[in-house]
Image (spheres, rainbow, N blue to C red):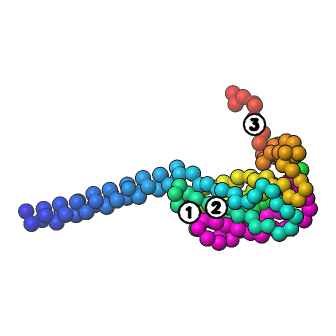
């Protein structure tokens, strides 16, 4: 009987530890299902000159203070190939910021690339700078230009393997 009590205590402790691991796995799965959100905090109309580009990063109700990376990509409409990538810094309460100088009137696209909590989001925000007007822009550029993709990397083999 004296040998049985330590054995029962040992088994009980192992069961409790296993239950704790399952709770951790369940909360980890729930975290991975919660989408990462990036809210662009930039006006749609700005004047030529220096501006603050900001994005608020949240994961559920939690403000993300420890994103792996936050980069702002900025380009003038029709000039995606000439885009600039700027590294943002965390300032406060889930907000990441970088300063940028808009040199000329025009329509610009600002796209933060946010990596945090094993997720990546990249919302795009359109801005009219100076005398430009978003309504006059016509069709907005697509975020991903399919013509830029390398055909070799995305081809499919149609041959039968018989």
Disc 1 to disc 2, C-alpha distance: 8 Å
Q: Nearer the viewer, residue 98 or 33?
A: 98
Residue under label 2: 56
Dot 1 alpha-carbon crowd within 10 angstroms: few under 14, some 14 to 19, many 20 or more: some
Q: Quadrant of residue 59?
A: bottom right
Disc 3 to disc 1, C-alpha distance: 42 Å
Q: Nearer the viewer, residue 80 or 24?
A: 80
- Is residue 150 visible from the viewing direction of this image? no
Residue 18 covered by magenta stretch? no
Residue under label 3: 156
Disc 3 to disc 2, C-alpha distance: 39 Å
Q: Position of residue 87 (x, y in %)?
A: 74, 68
Label 2 SS: strand
Verify CB contact (< 8 Å) between mark 1 and mark 2.
yes
> Of circles 3 and 2, which is in front?
2
**Figure quadrant of the C terminus:** top right
Does residue 31 lie above or below 53 as drawn?
above
Q: Quadrant of residue 110?
A: bottom right
Could you tell me how many numbered marks the image carries? Answer: 3
Dot 3 alpha-carbon crowd within 10 angstroms: few under 14, some 14 to 19, many 20 or more: few
Q: Residue at the spot x=89%, y=50% of the render?
A: 78
Verify CB contact (< 8 Å) between mark 3 and mark 1.
no
Q: Main secondary structure of the magenta part?
A: strand
Residue under label 1: 63
Verify CB contact (< 8 Å) between mark 3 and mark 2.
no
Q: Residue at the spot x=13%, y=62% of the render?
A: 4
**Figure quadrant of the N terminus:** bottom left
Q: The magenta stretch spans which residues? A: 80-108
């Amino acid at each position: 009987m004296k040998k049985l009590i330590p054995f029962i205590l040992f088994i009980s402790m192992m069961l409790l530890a296993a239950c704790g691991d399952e709770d951790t796995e369940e909360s980890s799965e729930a975290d991975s299902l919660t989408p990462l959100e990036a809210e662009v905090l930039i006006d749609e109309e700005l004047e030529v000159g220096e501006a603050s580009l900001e994005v608020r990063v949240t994961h559920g109700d939690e403000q993300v203070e420890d994103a792996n990376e936050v980069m702002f990509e900025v380009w003038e409409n029709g000039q995606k190939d000439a885009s600039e990538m700027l590294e943002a810094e965390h300032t406060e309460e889930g907000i990441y910021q970088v300063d940028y100088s808009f040199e000329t009137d025009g329509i610009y696209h600002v796209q933060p690339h946010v990596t945090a909590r094993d997720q990546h989001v990249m919302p795009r925000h359109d801005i009219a700078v100076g005398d430009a007007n978003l309504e006059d822009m016509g069709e907005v550029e697509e975020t991903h230009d399919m013509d830029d993709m390398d055909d070799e990397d995305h081809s499919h083999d149609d041959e039968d393997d018989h």
